[in-house]
Image (cartoon, rainbow, N blue to C red):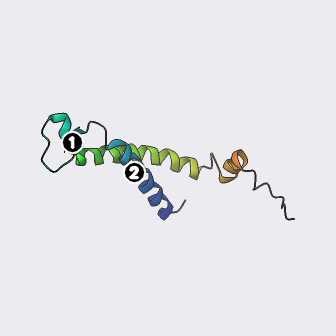
Amino acid sequence: MGITSAIVLFAVIWFMTFLCVIPIRLKTQGDLGDVVPGTHAGSPEVHNLKRKAWITTGIAFVLWAVVASIIVFEVITVRDIDGWMFDRMDGSSHVN
């Protein structure tokens, strides 16, 4: 795996993790009973975005290390995944 692939993999894992972490412990205006006129009751009042970004970075790093290790050490290869799902990389050509 090249450096660019590693960075892209980390970015994808980071954003997927971030989208999962954002709603955790989210306090909305409706929950606190302090809805600002003109806003939705589901709008966040306290979001702790910086803390969630750091938590996301830690979780994403651990997940990235596991996935990158699987890729680098070829524990699971593209041919393995193809064999489980499609069976198109067996080497024979099925040209009509």
Identify the residue at horizontal 48%, vertical 63% (top origin). Answer: 3
Return the x and y of residue 61 as percentages of the image width and height: 40, 47
Return the residue nearer the eye: 87 or 30.
Answer: 30
Residue 54 to residue 89: above or below: above
SS at badge 2: helix
Return the x and y of residue 83 as percentages of the image width and height: 73, 48
The reply to whether residue 46 is visible in this rendering is no
Residue underneath mark 2: 14
What type is the residue that disc 2 sits on? Trp
Identify the residue at horizontal 57%, vertical 47% (top origin). Answer: 70
Return the residue nearer the eye: 88 or 41.
Answer: 41
Q: Using the image, tell me which numbered label, if any, was put on residue 41.
A: 1
Return the x and y of residue 45 as percentages of the image width and height: 17, 43
Sequence-wise, the earlier of marks 1 and 2 is 2
The reply to whether residue 8 is visible in this rendering is yes
Q: How many marks?
A: 2
